[in-house]
Amino acid sequence: MRSSARCSPAPAARVWSSWLFPSARGQGLVQLPVLAMIGVSGIFYPVTALPGWLQAVAQATPIYWLGLGMRSALLPDTAAAVEIADSWRPLETAAALGVWAALGLALAPVVLRRMARRESGSRVAARREKALQRVG
């Protein structure tokens, strides 16, 4: 069962891995920067515990903003005291997630076209048959 592929925290890693590493073995290397990004994003501990320069790096990632939005929706207002600027920053969260969404929508056609050019119809059909054999 390959549930880890479905629960991947970063689909963007798969996109980059298809460009950088054509082999399946090399694609795992792309997960390392993604895991580092998750580590500094404030998901496991408050971002305010990090040094200032690392706080700036964390705020440049979409995972930080997703986590901030989820914390603001699920935690009481008093929990905002451990956030940057002691606030949930809902406008900044919406703007940052909007920018990341627009960036993803702009890059998706380019990446999908490139991925489609790399594979012939027979290779896609063979892979589909192999996947269907695993399921059924």
Image: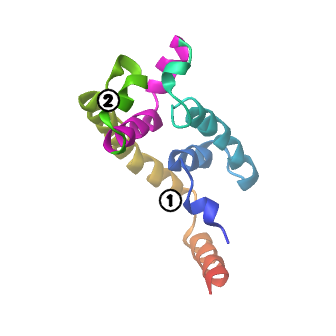
Q: Position of residue 40 (x, y in %)?
A: 56, 29
Magenta stretch secondary structure, dominant? helix
Question: Which picture quadrant has residue 16?
Answer: top right
Q: Residues within 10 Å of mark 2 (few under 14, many from 20)?
A: many
Q: Which residue extends farthest bottom? A: 136
Give the structural element (helix, strand or loop) at label 2. Answer: loop
Q: Which image quarter is the N terminus in?
A: bottom right
Question: Which picture quadrant has residue 104?
Answer: top left
Q: Which mark is residue 88?
A: 2
Residue 132, above or below 76: below
Q: Which residue does the numbered mark 1 point to in the structure image?
A: 116
Q: Which image quarter is the C terminus in?
A: bottom right
Between 103 and 66, the residue placed more toward the observer is 66
Q: Which mark is residue 129?
A: none
Q: Is 50 displayed left or right of 101 in the figure?
A: right
Report the amino acid beneath label 1: Ala
- The CA distance from mark 1 to mark 2 is 41 Å
Q: Is residue 108 magenta?
A: no
Q: Position of residue 127 (x, y in %)?
A: 63, 73
Residue at the image position 68 percent from the left and 48 percent from the top: 27
Give the structural element (helix, strand or loop) at label 1. Answer: helix
Report the amino acid beneath label 2: Trp
Q: Position of residue 117 (x, y in %)?
A: 52, 57
Q: Which residue extends farthest left? A: 91
Q: Is 25 displayed left or right of 42 in the figure?
A: right
Residue at the image position 38 percent from the left and 23 percent from the top: 81
Region of the chain picked out in magenta, as a range: 52-73
Q: Which residue extends farthest top? A: 52
